[in-house]
Image: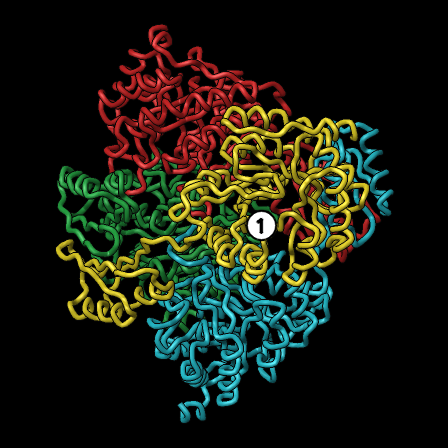
Chain colours: A green, B red, C yellow, D cyan
């Protein structure tokens, strides 16, 4: 912590600041001669409240944080990349993973057909919501446990790993029986109880960025999970809220290199929520992989124009199958690989 | 719902749209001769998914919502103002209510002294957090039940009503034993389980606007509470996230007249979180009341420069006491009243 | 300037930073023993580029600005409030000024009728655009010089001072012949040539905040004007661009106390552009004055539903006349005054 | 235009709306039986003001635009891609163009060395500012005509085309003598005089998106240029202002496929301003090309840590040279090409 005093601060004010820091159990070092006193505070970690309260003392101009607020997620303490192993599917290694499926699990037939189609195109994981957060209380909120069973059946048939949202802490036992990855949705990025429940599990956690979360807050949310002992966190950029109305959100692809620089955790990109328009998704899939993402999570539906949710941003099977080969080419262009989808792969699954 | 077709849409495309609407169980009426076909869809309520999926059909240019997504919170269905009665303290009537107290309950002494001070100045309710949401997992998260007991003791001594946050659904039984108003924090505005738990209670609910929530989403969050049967919802504007860094949030006071126009629910303003700087709070208290707010919720602390949280935005007792008389004058200028704080009032409480 | 080095910075890296600062002509003082080296840089003013380039040197973690970027607009150098005198109408003194009129000057009749009506209600200045910035090239852009002449005629008849926009530097000679205040619009807040042209004039300048301008940038725009010798700058908060769609902009009333704290310049509030909806304007007029604004600038039109621009946010004469008395009450409640409507004008109206 | 009336609108109100539309010279068609009256307005183009004023009539719930506000920039009227020919360098064709150079032209040596270095790596155009917009009036604003001469000399030596900013309309004659492309900066996206001056030229125009411009406003700014007769417009996405502070702006790469869908104009991406951090630029160069951009504009400086502006976001020669080959691979992966660095240039370098 650095405390900068006003050029007009009195000696008494400076001494009072020093005394207050010492009362809090920390020491100071002072620079003089720069036109205003500057104090460096010794000791770590310093409590957050100290930053705020020191700023209130008479004569103080500003208080500056010089240490990071997160630790376990930081690359400083864990220089090598974390690879999250989802039952053999590795997120964060050389292979770019494709997670695909409908917004909501609507029926056994819908999820099975989708699972086969996305696997054939090259996906390694299947997404689908059984518990859905909805802005209005009058909309479809998912089939709950029945939806989880449909997902499990699709896993059985295809070998695809399952990614589904844990919406409420009270559903943890149920959801964790069925899924391979616990998804924490954007609205819940700061639902701290949910983060801690996920953190006490040993399942991989896919943590979506909140719709107005700063990257530091997102990393601190991941810190909540890791602080409970679960190191298997996958970050997911899904667009942030801005003034632009042409897209549902503004997909912030710079989050990919920022996260790679600050953290060892893998990051995937969600171009479906990131744009809200199916016809923008293929371009943003390419851009996400080019930016360095470890995977993509994409909404695919057999009949988007009959979907119970998010139809407008879902790809058809045909559009998804057509989108994957260019993604593979871009992955290779940046030194990554992407699994082949094929009849053989289906058989092998 | 209005469906606008492209000028280039074929008759077959128009017919297909009509057929799809009918399959969904609704009828259509058509305008022709405007250069492009325009369909009005008959029936209400229309499912949200229909808006999205109709937009995907070939030949469709745009789909327009003409009905509101919320009903119980709407002034259309409830023209007169709702007055929420908090044990005799009425929010939404002529009297402007002042809710004041520390961010966190830190000690019995702190909360008692604050309660007496704010009551003396004119407050009718006491705020204070026993369960605190914190961006970082390493910070003080409140004293929990012990904090609730301290609040109850302060109520006993002063007669002030208690407003405290319900952070997790699992704490409902505990918190509702102690508090007069359940606060739902900004981060939890779309924690739908929490909203429904609060909705099944008969306690008044103070619902903060999410930090990037559109007003429609906020009203829909209130609809979640009301849809469970609890009609005692107080909305709270607390600032939204913008690019401006001089303030912690941007206090959106236009929310006050917008909410008054669209809804019958009362609304209060939180200038402390809304600005993040104690020295901006008094001006924004005045502006909030002038804008038509039914109350203010303000952070007050005996020693902001020692506070365990939010010290930077908390008023001292002196500053709070000095801020109230001008608020009273402004309330009177706009035809409202504000209770006198006084020794008598303390005795009467 | 403070330069914070990484905890891992080598002595050589620290020395290199010191050397680079010295080469730029400045000295340093160092704090050691805080876990990382901290350098204070001596000398002022430091060039902006130095902040950026020092941050690029190996071993440097962050560079912190401790001095303000503006000087002439700062209250540090000019503690007392500036009062801008517009031909006897004083902006920034005890009296709150009401500036009212149509978005565009449409006809002599329109502007004359409006001038009489707003004067009667209590306005002291008349707004009206002769040169209009328009998002689309196909819309009405104002009557130009003819519009200025109509404004002059309205001034002659009513004595109201004129506020009109200077859109292009090349129109300066023309506009300055007619107007009492040069308005710089939000889109032109960083049109530096225009700012300097206005700065070389001795006419008062009303400088609107850009629609995504940080307050510091706005103050620096005022600094451009003042740096040319014109001290008569009036700031105008007119709403900023956010994700909220219920209002045209988000009126940021916290700008009023922030500006009052940082600067000596007067500030007025524009609730018409700030909300974009005529029915929200009266509440925001009250809130603006309660927040401490030195004036209001409000769109008023004889027939908003026939206006050539901004009809949706314009008040009718009746609505404007009804809005003023409560504004006067609020002004008085916060220790300010507001001129009475002219009896002569009433008679003439 | 569609006008939706309130469910409670009276016949008289509906008739009044119809009458007002007819008075404005347009006809209507009505849908009845949908619970509320819906009017389609016949005729095109409808004036913008009509949208606003119809919304003010009693009984009107909302007014909906169904036609686009721009025409010349629209793909509807010009289905095939525009290729802008900059003296033989084609922007918008198969080849992805790299525009590189310093923020400001600082000296003849700096610009010559940079020109050779970027050409060697594969750039086809040289950027560099001679007239610089600066937030503070106290900073370096470019060398003006001397800077233009230095650019011309660099063109002579390398054959690179020149891209430089036209900051003020009054500089047009001067700047257009020297440059191959007129750059309109983000701050000037709605400086309509400047747009029209550029539109009357026959030089290609690089139009940056304003820092808080919606894509529709940006397209309308391009419409201003085209409406004057200049069809050679290149759009440039350079990041938008959001609440995130980890990057200088948020690069909105979804603008690339949105623009490609709505318009025939080419679009390039500026990852330097888009991120503000040199170490994020290479990833965003890759992502921009993968998203479908027709070019990149990148800041490169011989010594970023001595740059007079934008040092923090400038690449060194080495970093730029290293960034290009992966960009070429990604370009090829998406079916585009990127010119090889000139052997001559290498020899000359």
Residue found 45% across the figure and 58% down from its top? D249
- Quick check: can you spot residue D349? yes
Q: Give coordinates of residue C7: x percent, y percent.
A: 18, 59
Q: Give coordinates of residue D79: x percent, y percent.
A: 70, 68
Q: Say which quarter of the image contains residue C247.
A: top right
Q: Say which quarter of the image contains residue C197.
A: bottom right
Of C240 and D142, nearer the camera is: D142
Q: Is residue D5 left or right of residue D272?
A: right
Q: Which residue is mark 1?
A: C205
Q: Give coordinates of residue A12: x percent, y percent.
A: 19, 40
Of C30 and A65, nearer the camera is: C30
Residue found 68% across the figure and 76% down from its top? D202
The disc numbered 1 marks a residue on which chain? C
Q: Give coordinates of residue A291: x percent, y percent.
A: 41, 65
Describe the element under mark 1 as helix, strand or loop.
Answer: strand
Give the position of the C terminus of chain D as an image quadrant: bottom left
Q: Please, is residue A316 above or below residue D165 in the view?
A: above
Of C200 and A36, nearer the camera is: C200
How many other residues sit within 10 Å of disc 1, few (<14), some (14-19) or many (≥20)?
A: many
Of C85 and B147, nearer the camera is: C85
């Amino acid at each position: 912590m650095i405390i900068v005093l006003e050029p007009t601060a009195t000696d008494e004010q400076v001494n009072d600041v020093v005394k207050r820091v010492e009362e809090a159990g920390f020491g100071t070092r002072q620079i003089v001669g720069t036109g205003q006193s500057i104090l460096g505070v010794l000791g770590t970690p310093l409590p957050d409240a100290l930053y705020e309260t020191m700023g209130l003392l008479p004569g103080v101009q500003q208080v500056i944080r010089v240490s990071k607020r997160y630790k376990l997620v930081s690359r400083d303490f864990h220089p090598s990349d974390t690879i999250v192993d989802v039952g053999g599917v590795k997120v964060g290694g050389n292979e770019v993973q494709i997670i695909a499926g409908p917004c909501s699990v609507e029926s056994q037939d819908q999820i099975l057909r989708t699972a086969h189609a996305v696997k054939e195109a090259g996906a390694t994981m299947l997404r689908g919501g059984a518990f859905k957060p909805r802005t209005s209380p009058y909309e479809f909120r998912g089939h709950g446990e029945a939806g989880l069973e449909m997902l499990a059946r699709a896993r059985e048939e295809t070998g695809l790993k399952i990614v589904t949202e844990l919406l409420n802490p009270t559903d943890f036992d149920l959801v964790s029986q069925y899924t391979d990855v616990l998804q924490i949705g954007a609205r819940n990025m700061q639902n701290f109880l949910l983060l801690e429940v996920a953190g006490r599990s040993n399942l991989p956690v896919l943590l979506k960025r909140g719709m107005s979360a700063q990257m530091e807050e997102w990393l601190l949310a991941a810190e909540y999970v890791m602080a409970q002992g679960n190191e298997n966190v996958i970050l997911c950029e899904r667009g942030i809220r801005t003034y632009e109305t042409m897209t549902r959100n503004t997909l912030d692809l710079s989050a990919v290199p920022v996260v790679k620089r600050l953290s060892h955790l893998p990051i995937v990109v969600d171009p479906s929520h990131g744009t809200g328009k199916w016809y923008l998704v293929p371009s943003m899939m390419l851009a996400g992989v080019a930016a360095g993402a470890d995977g993509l999570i994409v909404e695919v539906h057999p009949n988007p124009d009959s979907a119970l949710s998010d139809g407008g941003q879902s790809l058809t099977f045909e559009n998804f199958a057509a989108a994957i080969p260019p993604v593979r080419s871009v992955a290779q262009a940046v030194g990554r690989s992407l699994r082949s989808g094929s009849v053989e792969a289906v058989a092998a699954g």
